[in-house]
Amino acid sequence: MKLLSVIVPCYNEEENIRDFYDELMKNASFFESNGLEAEVIYIDDGSRDRTVERIKEVAASDPRVHMVSFSRNFGKEAAIYAGLQKAKGDYAVLMDCDLQDPPALLPEMFRYIWEGYDSVATRRVTRKGEPVIRSFFARMFYRIINKISRTEIVDGARDYRLMTRQVVDSILAMAEYNRFTKGIFGWVGYETKWLEYENIERKKGETKWSFWKLFLYSIDGITAFSTVPLAIASFMGVLFCVVAFLMILFIIVRKLMFGDPTSGWPSMVCIVLMCSGIQLFCLGIVGQYLSKTYMEVKRRPLYLVKEEL
C-alpha cells in the first residue's frame, strides 16, 4: 500500500469541511483497488469561525483525518508549506476546501503519474463567475510575469496539483520566507502534465481573495521570480540623466545664441513633478526588494502551530 497525503488549506470554511470530505471519499473504491491509502491533512489558517470544530467532528469519525491549526492567520502560502511538511505520503495533492478543485479528477491525475509524470497540475480554461475587471488584471499579470521572468507560470494555474515524493521534497528544500508557490512549482521543474477544466464556482461561502489581496500577491510573485523591475529602475535613472545632460547643453547654447528669455514656470513645475515621481517610483521598486530581503534575514518561522490533531 502506498500513501496519498491530501493537503487542504482552509480559512473560515466551516460550511465546506464536511462537504469536501464526503466528496473526496467518493474516490475510496479507486484508492482501495489501486493499493492506495489516504490521509487528509486540514491546515487551519487561523480561522475565526467554527472551522476547527468541524474538522474535529470529521476526525472523530475517521482516524485518517489530521489537523494543524495556526495561532493566527499566516496566509495560504504558509498553510501550503505546513501541509507539505506534515505530509508523509508517497504522493501528495494540494486541494482547496471550497470544492473548486474537483476530487473527481484524482483518478485521471493518478493515471498520468503512473505513466511516468512527476506531477499533474490543473489550470482553468475559463474564469466563469469571476468579475470581469479581476479576470482582466489576472490575465495581464500572467502575461507580464512570463515576459520578465525565466520561470514559466501558466495562465489559469490552480494550486490543485498531485506530486510524487521527490517533487514534494524539492519544494520543501526551498525554505524561503517570501513564498510564491506558483513560481516555486515552475522553478523546481520536473515533468508536469497539465489538465484543463472549466472554472467551478464555490459551493458555499465567499472567496477570501479580494482584488487588493490579489494585487499584493502579484507583487510578491514578480519580486520573488524576477529582477527586471530593478533593471527598469536603473534604465530610467540613466535615461533621465542623459535627458538632463542634453537639456543643460540646450540651455547653454540658447543662452549664448539668444540670450536668456524667461520661460513659463508651469512647464518647469511639470518637469520637476515628473522627475520626482519617477524617482519615487524607482525608490519604491528598490524598497520592495529591500523589504523582502529584510524579512528573509530575520529568519522568522513561516507559521506557528496552536493545536495539532
Image: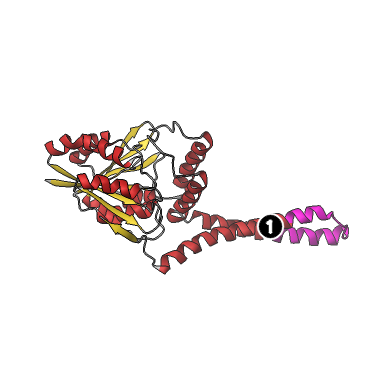
The image shows residue 5, relative to residue 247, as above or below, that is above
Q: Quadrant of residue 249?
A: bottom right
Amino acid under disc 1: Cys
Q: Main secondary structure of the magenta part?
A: helix
Q: Nearer the viewer, residue 35 or 281?
A: 35
Relative image position of residue 225 (x, y in whole percent): 43, 54
Within 10 angstroms of label 1, few (less than 14), some, or many (20 or more) residues?
Answer: some
Visible residue check, residue 8: no
The image shows residue 89, relative to residue 21, as above or below, that is below
Residue 292 horizontal side relative to residue 275, left or right:
left
Q: Quadrant of residue 95?
A: top left
Relative image position of residue 33 (x, y in whole percent): 12, 36
Q: Secondary structure at mark 1?
A: helix
**Does the magenta-highlighted stretch encompass residue 257?**
yes
Q: How many marks?
A: 1
The residue at the point 46 percent across, 50 percent down is 217
Q: Nearer the viewer, residue 33 or 24?
A: 24
The residue at the point 63 percent across, 59 percent down is 279
Relative image position of residue 261 (x, y in whole percent): 88, 57
- In this view, the residue farthest toward the bottom is 298
Residue 243 horizontal side relative to residue 154, left or right:
right
Residue picked out by circle 1: 275
Colour mapping = secondary structure
Q: Nearer the viewer, residue 269 or 247?
A: 269
Visible residue check, residue 68: yes
What is the magenta range? Answer: 244-271
**Does the magenta-highlighted stretch encompass residue 40?**
no
Q: Which quadrant holds the C terminus?
A: bottom left
